[in-house]
Image (cartoon, grey):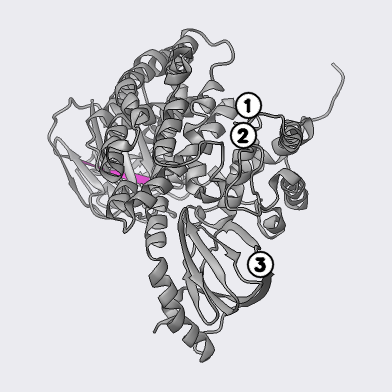
């Protein structure tokens, strides 16, 4: 398994594992590791918004809605500590990965995300 | 079955909570001291009951508020409540009538019950912020937990802010003594929180847990008990070893770090968080103690006894492995994966708590080192107040010789201005400035300090300026 740490918001908030991007999403339905690319045609799911009052995330490209319930309850195991997330991916150790940045829609950026200096961690 | 009505859980809040805290803290054991240090009396702790009426313990402190006075007050009280479960004797025994009376009062049913009634509210007040700081999600399994926990072994550790503060201090010996003092609440009764989880009946992991305790207790040979090793460290650098001798110099974050384990150990619904916190501390202590040994030797030379730290370099290599392989994973096997998020949470929560303590201590050393500068800063801030450029709430105070303002902190910056007389202003262990009439000092927010009057009378003013730097422009 591959244990990776990345930011919740700001620089380095996207981790690419074997080329696939993931972000930490904080939504009103719960927090979870979100595959940032839509499984339909690769749209920017990190900019998606929820259907009204339903945990279904709508991709801005083709408006395809995907439930995030499974990602919340049975997705990639993750823990957030302040602005740092640590996730355990099923990939083998040594799998290529890199940190980048992806903007998040308001529905996925949380309402009380806190940027904190490293010294406070 | 007859109708007994709905169960009503225990709750205490509002005026009832304030009254209960006042009632607990107004015990004569907990009133202000006339000396800076307690003298071989483990039952006496200064809880400053005269100010608890002004504090709101009925809410959860935010992350930005954990160094405010409310938390210092809460953790002093919590330390006392938790320690009602531990046995302490004065070094000089109990022949002294007053100490015998204090012994009985400290362990009395009245004191213990009063403490227990306010403990849940204080824990919510002081540790509730961790609910926002740490969040666990996704599908955790035994394998993902093990991968996650083992990753800490590969994480390189850098010298902490506290270690850097000591090395860079203008008075490294004073800073190092202040550092050791911060660990006294933990190390002198070391492993006591851990022992709370030895009791009960929960299978093989219980016996493995007990093995860790056996190591901490030196296998029944007192000279090798970890607390005894730490006593020897304190003695070797000229510090006293009677419990809470330096109570007034504890920072709230130091108490918080120690109280965190009592909090987890006292509340068995948090047992699994304790597992995570235990693993983090046992694993990272190896490097920490190696660096602490080197740091203390660099500051004090070869006269310092560092066996406490070198012992942990050795034994915690085993304890980290034992915690994971013999306790955590077997407990997951026995209890099922639903306990894993709690283990992860404890692992992360203690990092938050330890990080706060590290930063707080480094800031306190900077504050102690800046004593002469803060005294110089009085002049321009006082000029701004006198010229009317700054208007701040002011308290006019008159105190007689020997009046000791027990240590505390303020939530914002203040200016102390001496109108007449002499004050010794104390900003930490062995750290003070003498303030005469017309002089004063800037008091930084959240920084521990106290004062004693050294003239027949001292008239002084405290101006609550909020941010002293705004007075300089």
What residue would you read off at disc 2? B82
Secondary element type, mark 1: loop
Q: CA distance from mark 2 to mark 3?
A: 35 Å
Q: CA distance from mark 3 to mark 1?
A: 37 Å
Asked if badges 1 and 2 are on one and the same chain, I answer yes
Compared to residue B29, the image places residue B385 above or below, namely below
Q: On what subunit does the disc labeled 2 rest?
A: B
Question: How packed is label 3: few (under 14 Cα within 10 Å), some, or many (20 or more)?
Answer: some
Which segment did they paint magenta?
A21-25
From the image, which quarter does the N terminus of chain A lie in? Answer: top left
At 79% across and 34% down in the image, what residue appears? Answer: B110
Picture coordinates of residue B84, whole percent (x, y): 66, 32
Which residue is outermost to the right? Answer: B2
What residue would you read off at disc 1? B87
Picture coordinates of residue A82, whole percent (x, y): 38, 47
Instruction: Name the one closer to the observer, B31 or B95.
Output: B95
Reading the chain from its start, which is encountered first: label 1 or label 2?
Answer: 2
At 58% across and 16% down in the image, what residue appears? Answer: B199
Say whether residue A108 is left or right of residue B460. left
Q: Can the viewer see residue A82 in this picture?
A: no
Which label number is shown at residue B264?
A: none
Magenta: main secondary structure: strand
What residue would you read off at disc 3? B401
Instruction: Name the one closer to the observer, B300 or A20.
Output: B300
Q: CA distance from mark 1 to mark 2?
A: 11 Å
Q: Nearer the viewer, mark 1 or mark 2?
A: 1
């Amino acid at each position: 398994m591959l244990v990776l740490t990345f930011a919740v918001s700001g620089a380095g908030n996207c981790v690419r594992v074997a080329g696939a991007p993931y972000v930490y999403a904080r939504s009103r339905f719960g927090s979870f590791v979100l595959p940032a690319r839509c499984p339909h045609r690769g749209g920017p799911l990190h900019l998606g918004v929820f259907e009204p009052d339903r945990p279904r995330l709508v991709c801005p490209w083709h408006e395809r809605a995907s439930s995030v319930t499974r990602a919340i309850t049975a997705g990639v195991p993750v823990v957030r500590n302040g602005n740092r997330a640590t996730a355990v991916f099923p990939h083998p150790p040594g799998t290529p990965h890199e940190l980048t940045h992806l903007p998040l829609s308001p529905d996925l950026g949380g309402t009380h995300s806190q940027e904190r200096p490293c010294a406070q961690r | 079955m007859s109708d007994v009505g709905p169960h009503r859980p225990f709750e205490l809040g509002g005026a009832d909570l304030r009254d209960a805290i006042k009632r607990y803290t107004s015990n004569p054991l907990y009133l202000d001291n006339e000396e800076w240090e307690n003298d071989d009396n483990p039952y006496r702790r200064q809880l400053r009951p005269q100010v608890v009426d002004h504090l709101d313990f009925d809410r959860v402190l935010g992350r930005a508020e954990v160094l405010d006075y409310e938390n210092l007050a809460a953790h002093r009280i919590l330390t006392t409540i938790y320690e009602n479960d531990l046995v302490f004797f004065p070094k000089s025994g109990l022949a002294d009538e007053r100490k015998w009376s204090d012994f009985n009062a400290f362990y009395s049913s009245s004191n213990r019950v009063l403490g227990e009634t306010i403990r849940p509210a204080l824990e919510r007040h002081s540790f509730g912020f961790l609910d926002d700081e740490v969040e666990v999600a996704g599908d955790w399994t035994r394998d993902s937990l093990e991968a996650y926990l083992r990753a800490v072994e590969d994480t390189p550790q850098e010298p902490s802010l506290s270690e850097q503060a000591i090395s860079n201090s203008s008075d490294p010996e004073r800073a190092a003594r202040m550092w050791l003092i911060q660990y006294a609440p933990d190390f002198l009764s070391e492993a006591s929180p851990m022992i709370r989880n030895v009791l009960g009946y929960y299978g093989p992991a219980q016996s493995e847990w007990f093995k860790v305790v056996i190591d901490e207790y030196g296998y029944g040979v007192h000279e090798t008990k970890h607390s005894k090793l730490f006593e020897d460290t304190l003695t070797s650098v000229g510090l006293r070893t009677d419990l809470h001798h330096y109570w007034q110099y504890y920072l709230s974050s130091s108490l918080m770090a120690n109280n965190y384990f009592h909090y987890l150990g006292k509340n068995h619904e948090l047992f699994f968080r304790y597992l995570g916190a235990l693993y983090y501390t046992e694993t990272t202590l190896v490097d920490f103690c190696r660096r602490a040994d080197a740091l203390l030797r660099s500051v004090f030379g070869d006269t310092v006894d560092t066996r406490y730290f070198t012992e942990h370099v050795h034994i915690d290599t085993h304890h980290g492995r034992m915690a994971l392989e013999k306790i955590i994973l077997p407990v997951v096997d026995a209890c099922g994966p639903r306990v894993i998020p709690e283990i992860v949470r404890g692992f992360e929560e203690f990092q938050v708590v330890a990080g706060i303590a590290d930063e707080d201590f480094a800031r306190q050393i900077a504050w102690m080192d800046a004593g002469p500068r803060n005294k110089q800063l009085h002049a321009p801030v006082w000029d701004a107040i006198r010229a009317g450029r700054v208007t701040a709430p002011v308290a006019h105070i008159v105190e007689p010789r020997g009046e000791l303002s027990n240590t505390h902190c303020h939530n914002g910056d203040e200016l102390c201005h001496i109108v007449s007389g002499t004050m010794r202003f104390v900003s930490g262990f062995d750290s003070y400035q003498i303030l005469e009439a017309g002089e004063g000092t800037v008091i930084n927010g959240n920084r521990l300090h106290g004062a004693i009057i050294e003239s027949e009378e001292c008239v002084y003013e405290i101006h609550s300026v909020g941010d002293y730097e705004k007075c300089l422009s």
